[in-house]
Image (cartoon, helix red, strand yellow):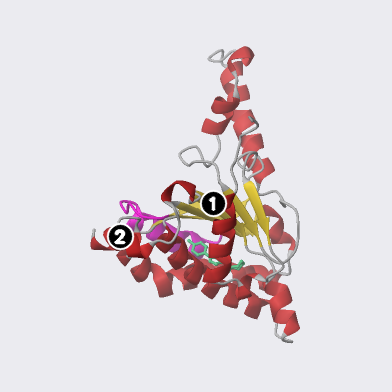
């Protein structure tokens, strides 16, 4: 409770943004870890490891700012195509991250979640993640939502399949299908759509990330590589968002 009062928007000295304009849900494509390592003649995995430390920093800052949901693209369905050793290393990062930081996240009232297909993940990864989900499920602060083995087309396809099967069973008429019905079948059914998408490392594309949910979001791209992404950069993206007005297609 004390943590919540400290980190949430309750104490005026603890937030520097006007409350209305803080993005409630920020999604981040954490790109540039391999490039960060190459620039230092280090192996790619060293970049991933450094990127993990950045995750911790940015979660803390997001909580301070008063962001409600932070979705981080940790591993895509396409990432399985990477070399075996790199995939094995990546799959150990959730466990390492949680071993190191779960006690702090609990103290800070953070709720850990996962979106993606858990079935294909190694058992040790699933165990680490499930423990964190369980231990934080009643936390009421920042929702830290890791996209792990996530692909947006897969997610939409699964939603379409579920609806098609309801039609086949005669429980649904095709004419009844609308936006909100599709939304309810996505992994984000109980979350707001992201208000702000950040992608680091200079690539300007979505790479199969939250295609449906990002329909009306603001995008903020930076050349900064993820391991170099700082609290200041997050604040810069958030302030720029606060200065823009979103219109959802209206005027
Ligand atoms: C990963 C570090 C960040 C940069 C992007 C690639 C490497 C944190 C997690 C994580 C995931 C689930 C969870 C707790 C932590 C993570 C992967 C890669 C696969 F419950 N960072 N990080 N997972 N990187």
* 202 w.r.t. 41: above or below: above
> Magenta segment range?
118-142
Q: Position of residue 159 (x, y in %)?
A: 60, 33
Magenta span has 125?
yes
Note whether residue 206 is visible. Answer: yes
Instruction: Say which residue label 1 marks.
Output: 242
Q: Position of residue 232 (x, y in %)?
A: 54, 70
Name the residue rendered at 30%, 60% in the picture.
11
Q: Secondary structure at mark 1?
A: helix
- Name the quadrant of the N terminus: bottom left
Q: Main secondary structure of the magenta part?
A: helix
Magenta span has 237?
no
Locate residue 24 relative to residue 227 in the image: left or right: left
Mark 2 and mark 1: span between their CA atoms?
Answer: 20 Å
Splitting the image into 4 quarters, where does residue 236 fall? bottom right
**Number of labelled discs?**
2
- Name the quadrant of the C terminus: top right
Q: Secondary structure at mark 2?
A: loop
Locate residue 121 relative to residue 133 in the image: left or right: right
- Find out if the beta carbon at label 2 lies less than 8 Å from the nearest ligand 1 atom: no
Looking at this rendering, what residue extends furthest in the bottom direction?
A: 41
Instruction: Say which residue label 2 marks.
Output: 11
Name the residue rendered at 72%, 68% in the picture.
223
Decide which of 66, 157 is in the foreground and name it: 66
Q: Position of residue 225 (x, y in %)?
A: 67, 71
Ligand 1 image-quadrant field = bottom right
């Amino acid at each position: 409770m004390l943590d919540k009062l400290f980190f949430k928007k309750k104490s005026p000295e603890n937030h520097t943004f006007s409350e209305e304009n803080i993005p409630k849900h920020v999604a981040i494509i954490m790109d540039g870890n391999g490039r960060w390592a190459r620039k230092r003649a280090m192996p790619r995995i060293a970049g991933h490891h450094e990127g993990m430390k950045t995750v911790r920093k940015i979660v803390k800052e997001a909580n301070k700012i008063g962001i409600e949901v932070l979705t981080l693209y940790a591993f895509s369905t396409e990432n399985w195509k990477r070399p075996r050793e790199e995939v094995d290393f990546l799959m150990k990062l959730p466990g390492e991250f949680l071993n190191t930081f779960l006690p702090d996240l609990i103290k800070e009232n953070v709720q850990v979640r996962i979106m993606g297909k858990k079935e294909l993940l190694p058992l040790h990864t699933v165990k680490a993640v499930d423990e964190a989900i369980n231990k934080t499920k009643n936390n009421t602060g920042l929702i830290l939502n890791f996209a792990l083995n996530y692909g947006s087309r897969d997610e939409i396809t699964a939603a379409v399949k579920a609806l098609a099967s309801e039609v086949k069973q005669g429980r649904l008429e095709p004419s009844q299908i609308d936006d909100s019905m599709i939304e309810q079948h996505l992994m984000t059914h109980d979350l707001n759509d992201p208000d702000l998408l950040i992608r680091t490392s200079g690539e300007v594309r979505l790479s199969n990330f939250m295609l449906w949910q990002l329909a009306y979001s603001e995008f903020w791209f930076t050349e900064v590589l993820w391991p170099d992404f700082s609290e200041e950069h997050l604040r810069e993206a958030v302030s720029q968002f606060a200065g823009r007005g979103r219109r959802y297609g209206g005027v």
